[in-house]
Image (tube, helix red, strand yellow):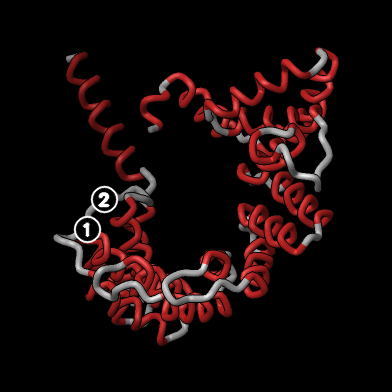
Amino acid sequence: MRFKRVYLLCAFLFLVSGVFAEEAEYLKWIKQGRKGNVEKQYLAGLAYYKGIGGAQKDYKKAYKWFEFAARNGSLAAYVSLGDMHFFGYLSSADEKKAFNWYLKAAKKGNAEAMEKIGDMYLHSRFLGQNYFEAAKWYKRAAGKSVSPGASSKLARLYYLGGKHFNRDEKKALKYFLRAFELGDYNVAHYISGIYEDKGDYEKAAQWLVKGAENGSPIAMYYLAKAYGGLREYSEKSFIKLDYVQAYKWLYILAKKEYQPRYEKDLSILTRKMEKSEVRKAKKLAAPLLQKLVSEEDLKWSKYSKKHPSEMK
């Protein structure tokens, strides 16, 4: 009898917990999507696409909801449908279908779709490589987007040049500066290089510092090499030798991401420095470590150091 009472109590608690359990977020999106909420239709698709909101990944269901949202005018859904075709999430990749979806969104003013069309003109087999068309679409996207991607890519096109596409440092600088303003701090070393080419060594140095202080690993490394007189920077005159500063930036960088060359350069610098200078460099690095190196960075750096073969 006692066992029966316990069993009934457990069954009751199980039923109650089910009634009062919080409904998964993606189910709420589906309900609202079925009532005509276009934003929630897109979110339902995204839930199945990314496996978020409590949903399991299901590309067929994702595609269905993206189509639903697209028919109701969601430009984000147009782009996601393009992505699914481009990467072949339903069957084989289909660049033509991907391009058509991106083009539909781009014609309605979607900057992300414009940027993806630019990418396709550089890298897809369907369109063939066309630097002029890529630049055209990146420029359109850069004019509308509040994210730095299109500006960064357009700037690199102008900076590097390409097939029948003339290099233009003036235009490159314009879009690198815009990309930096929008948060792509990894372009700082390009800006530094352009000013160095112009002979403005003070600005060249300032931009490496700006990039490093905003967390750009490339700028940190270039700045450390310049301060330390390491390898190709041994002849640079726009930054004076300063082993303490060099060590500081390499020390931060080595904490942020593991690379054998960082360890090697730190060893080289250590042999050139007094112990008091190394302590000073680490003290200067301390506040920047808190700002520029996350817990995730530290974990990944430690893991990479223990498993170097997996990083190749």
Amino acid type, residue under disc 2 in the picture: Lys
x 67%, y 73%: residue: 170
Note whether residue 132 is visible: yes
The image shows residue 16, relative to residue 107, as above or below, that is: above
Q: Secondary structure beneath disc 2? A: loop
Instruction: Pick the quarter of the image with the N terminus.
Output: top left
Q: Which mark is residue 89?
A: 1
Residue 115: horizontal and vertical position, in percent?
45, 72
Q: Tell me if mark 2 has few (under 14), some (14-19) or many (20+) residues whose alpha carbon lies within 10 angstroms of its own.
A: some
Amino acid type, residue under disc 1 in the picture: Tyr
The image shows residue 219, relative to residue 132, as above or below, that is: above
Q: Nearer the viewer, residue 151 or 91?
A: 151
* Residue that sits furthest to the front in the current view: 235
x 67%, y 21%: residue: 268
User: Counting residues from the N terminus, which is met first, the one under dot 1 or under dot 2?
Assistant: 2
* Residue that sits furthest to the left in the current view: 91
